[in-house]
Image: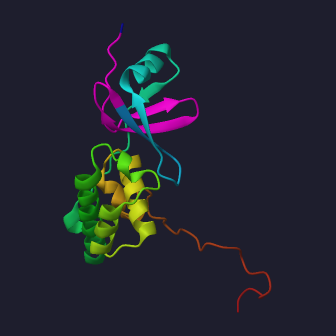
Amino acid sequence: MDYIALNVSDIVVSGQLCYRIIYVSEKMCVLCKMACTALELICVPTNELMEQLIAGTARIENDKEKRVVDYENLPEPLRKKFLAKRNFIRDVKAAYGPFYLDLLGKKNKSILKKIISAYNLSHVTAWRCIRLYLQSGLDENSLLPKSTEISTKAPYSYTQKPGRKCIDVPAGI
């Protein structure tokens, strides 16, 4: 029997659905559904998940895309926003981690409301930050906007003027 390692931030693919592992213990795993706009956390017994992996109904993929960002080179307004969101997530992690299951349901989340008001965030922005953080496998760089990624495209070199040639104006004017 092969040894299967379950690590936080690994991706579990089961059929068409992808889940990110956000907590692992001997008894249970907490998975976050990826590629959706709602926060969905699933608590699965570890032995049940291992059985699915051994049977082949699910598989594990390692995260390929890790963003490395130099925070000191960010523009000052973007850096301030990122640091505020990062501190917000750290407070949420301290209050609700490592399971994050208390974030689900309709029960009163007075601690979360206090944290949101302390950082002066809207509820939509706060939940988006939490969802992106959990779906990324607890990666704080997911709080950065996608515009901070380094472009791999080469700059376009204009050898000729772009666009269609004018047909209404006679040549030579």
Q: In the picture provided, is 167 more to the left or to the right than 63?
A: right
Q: Is residue 142 left or right of residue 36?
A: left
Q: Residue at x 34, y 39 (%)?
A: 9
Q: Position of residue 88 (x, y in %)?
A: 27, 64
**Observer-nearest residue: 105 or 55?**
105
Q: Quadrant of residue 85?
A: bottom left
Residue 136 seen in render:
no
At 48% from the left and 44% from the top, the residue drawn is 34
Decide whether residue 53 is among the magenta residues: no
Indicate the colouring scheme.
rainbow
> Which quarter shows the N terminus?
top left
Vertical position of residue 139 compared to residue 161: above or below:
above
Q: Position of residue 126 (x, y in %)?
A: 39, 65
- Residue at position x 29%, y 62% in the image: 111
Q: Could you tell me which quadrant the C terminus lies in?
A: bottom right
Magenta segment, which residues? 2-28
Q: Answer whether residue 3 is visible to the viewer in this image.
A: yes
Q: Residue furthest left?
A: 72
